[in-house]
Amino acid sequence: MRTLLRLGLCLFALCLASRALADNPSRDAGTHFQRGVELYNDGDFRGALVEFKRAYSTWPRANVLYDIGQTEYQLLDYASSLRTMERYLAETGPNAAHRSEVESTVEVLRGRVGRLSIITDATDCDITIDDQPVGTTPITQVLLVSVGARRIAAVCPGRPTTTRQVEVAAGETVRLDLKLRPPPMAALRNLTPPAKPGPKAPPTRMGLTIGWTVTAILAAATIAVGSSALVEQSRLETLKQSYPVTRDALDRQASLNTGLAIASDALGVAALAAAGVSTYLTVKYDRERKVRLSLNGSNVLLVTTF
């Protein structure tokens, strides 16, 4: 008797456990579905779509496809909404709830989609449209996409990501030839190494002549302007001692003196710089000339002066 009682209790426990396991998917799906409804009513359509899809994957029911399609419609994802609504029609009977509404929506959605044919020059690359995965190359089928500007990206092993943007109008099929970027190492091999800069040309006698000529001109200009500045300075002192003299005359003479002084200083600095450069080139020219003369002799002897 006790053995039969224990066996009965075990069978009853097994039935309860199997019933609980069977109810878990529907209970979880119901929780996700209710949360999706709340998010939808709050205007959080992206969050609602996640919950509706989780509810459908947990416990597939055709009526949930209606909610998924409506949410995709609100997100302006017309292509996904059309696929979902057509699936709803295929999985429900003629007397299903919302059927007439879904049929009308499908007709509207068919006017808001186009098609995209993607051709690539590499295989095993993951293709996404607006960050949503659509397959791995080669993609032989024509893809249904929403109208408007679409962002296509190809992610290939060992290659940089290639992205393109295309505009798709309603009812048209766009062909996209997606040329994928080469791997980094291949791109480096194709680069031509930059040419090394050649040795600097030695100074020539003509260059020295021009340098010293410019130095002489700047020095002469410095002396001339400096002399003019001294003359005008003397005139200013004379005006100060003269009577009567206007303030405007003194200001004009003072401004002239200042301008001449500045010009004289600038010319002097330029003359010193030119003299320094010319001296450097002269020394360099003499050294190289002595080296060339030594190499041209009967005995190879390097002679330099410091």
Image (cartoon, rainbow, N blue to C red):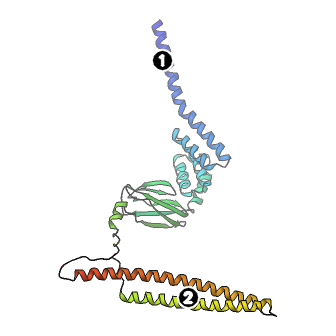
Disc 1 target residue: 11
Provide residue 239's location: percent of width, then percent of height.
75, 92
Q: Residue at coordinates 52% horizontally, 30% vertically from top-left?
A: 22
Q: Residue furthest right?
A: 244
Disc 2 target residue: 222
Q: Quadrant of residue 264?
A: bottom right
Q: Residue at coordinates 33% horizontally, 67% vertically from top-left?
A: 190
Provide residue 297's location: percent of width, then percent of height.
20, 83
Report crowding for label 1: few under 14, some 14 to 19, many 20 or more residues within 10 A (C-alpha): few
Q: Amino acid at mark 2?
A: Thr
Q: Residue furthest front?
A: 241
Q: Residue furthest top?
A: 1
Q: Nearer the viewer, residue 64 or 216?
A: 216
Query: Mark 2 or mark 1: which is in front?
Result: 2
Mark 2: secondary structure: helix
- Left or right of 300 in this view: 148: right
Q: Amino acid at mark 1?
A: Leu
Q: Is residue 269 above or below residue 72?
A: below
Provide residue 236's location: percent of width, then percent of height.
71, 90
Position of the C terminus by quadrant: bottom left
Mark 1: secondary structure: helix
First-in-chain label (2 vs 1)? 1
Provide residue 151's location: percent of width, then percent of height.
51, 61
Q: Nearer the viewer, residue 25 or 255?
A: 255
